[in-house]
Image (spheres, helix red, strand yellow):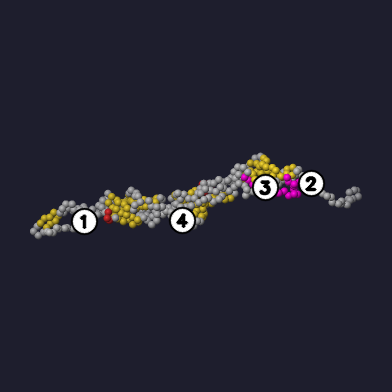
Amino acid sequence: MNNINRSLTSEIGNGATILTIPQAPLNLRNRAGITSATQIGLEWDLIPSIDQGGAAILYYSIFKAVGAGVYETLETGLTTTTYIAIDLSQGETYSFKVQSENIYGPSLDSLPTSILAAQVPDRPAAPTTSLSGTSLTVTWVAPDDRGKAIDEYTITILKSDLSTYSLELNDCDGSDPIIVGQTYCVIDVLVLRTGDFSLPWGTKVFAKVIAHNSYGYSQESAPGAGINGVLMTYPDAPTTLTEQTLSRAADSITFTWVDGQFNNGAVVTKYRVSMSDTDGLGTYSELVPLAFIKEYTASGLTAGHTYNFKVEAYNAFGYGGFSSAKSIKCATKPSKIVAPPTTSVSTRFVTIDWTTPNSNGLPITAYSIYIRKGD
């Protein structure tokens, strides 16, 4: 160009390359499939040729800081875009940066990324179940959370088909923070006896537990129950109280009974008899509990009085309801006439006299009189 004008444009030259340090790596991120409670997997994008500063990337360097602390060199000389930081502390948050380097020097730092050394919780141990009154408690021990707090449990109960486990979300919702914190839930036995579960009395209740944190779900625990995890309730009341007439006495009553239809989950092991002792009209008093026999003799009674008896059956849950009351009069046949009769003879009659024996609870209604023949 001069004062007159510009010249024509020259031909295109052979070009030149600007040589410099490479661009900082981009998209440094967590490799979730690698990261655990003691290691963290990292990866970043490969730097395109145009951003390598005119010379090939020789290697990468990784820098680590604990929490908000000072960065230190973790590894250098890396030739791939992946890395695994090992020997970390469970539950600790680590920050990482990466640099690329060519023959002209290292790049600027990448943007940092912070990653928690954590993973899904460990598999919980098998839970236990225990019955108390009309409630069943499922209890478990919180497993190692592997660096991230457990925020939920999944609790399932074995159904009556003995193969399928099902959730019970009314009383045992494992997403409830209270249940998460206390690691147990309490279920109404009626829920387990009906509906989706329909467990019969006498069933040992099995449960399984899964723990969850923000990294995912643990493995499912093994099934667990407990010594006291059997569904049971009070046994049915005994029936058919029956006096044993062959054992009648003037001062005692013997009677037997039959077990109720169902023991409701636990074997009946003893009975308790109660008796009203004021001619059948008074209040009941408890007699001595009996071992596993279905017969009782009440002694020391008053002949001629009527006594009412009731019986309760006992299983591991406790005493059931009373049987229907049985009224029995304490009575037996009259006592033997002790003194021999006396006789007196008049012109036409023979008079026989005797002493009235003890009637033993019932009025004497007749006598049988025997006279020896002359032979």
Is disc 4 placed on a helix, strand or loop?
loop
Q: Residues within 10 Å of mark 4 (few under 14, many from 20)?
A: many
Name the front one of labels 3 and 1: 3
Of labels 2 and 3, earlier in sequence is 2
Mark 2 → mark 3, Cα distance in angstroms:
28 Å
Q: Is residue 55 magenta?
A: yes
Q: Residues within 10 Å of mark 3 (few under 14, many from 20)?
A: some
Mark 1 → mark 2, Cα distance in angstroms:
137 Å
Where are the magenta residues, as a range? Answer: 39-58
The residue where tag 4 is placed is 199
Q: Amino acid at mark 4?
A: Leu
- Residue 194 position in % (x across, y down): 46, 57
The residue where tag 2 is placed is 18
Q: Amino acid at mark 2?
A: Ile
The residue where tag 1 is placed is 364
Tell me the residue at 26%/51% (across/down). 251
Q: Nearer the viewer, residue 128 or 309?
A: 128
Mark 1 → mark 4, Cα distance in angstroms:
59 Å
Mark 3 → mark 1, Cα distance in angstroms:
111 Å
Name the front one of labels 2 and 3: 3
- Residue 357 position in % (x across, y down): 19, 53
Mark 4 → mark 3, Cα distance in angstroms:
54 Å
Q: Amino acid at mark 3?
A: Thr
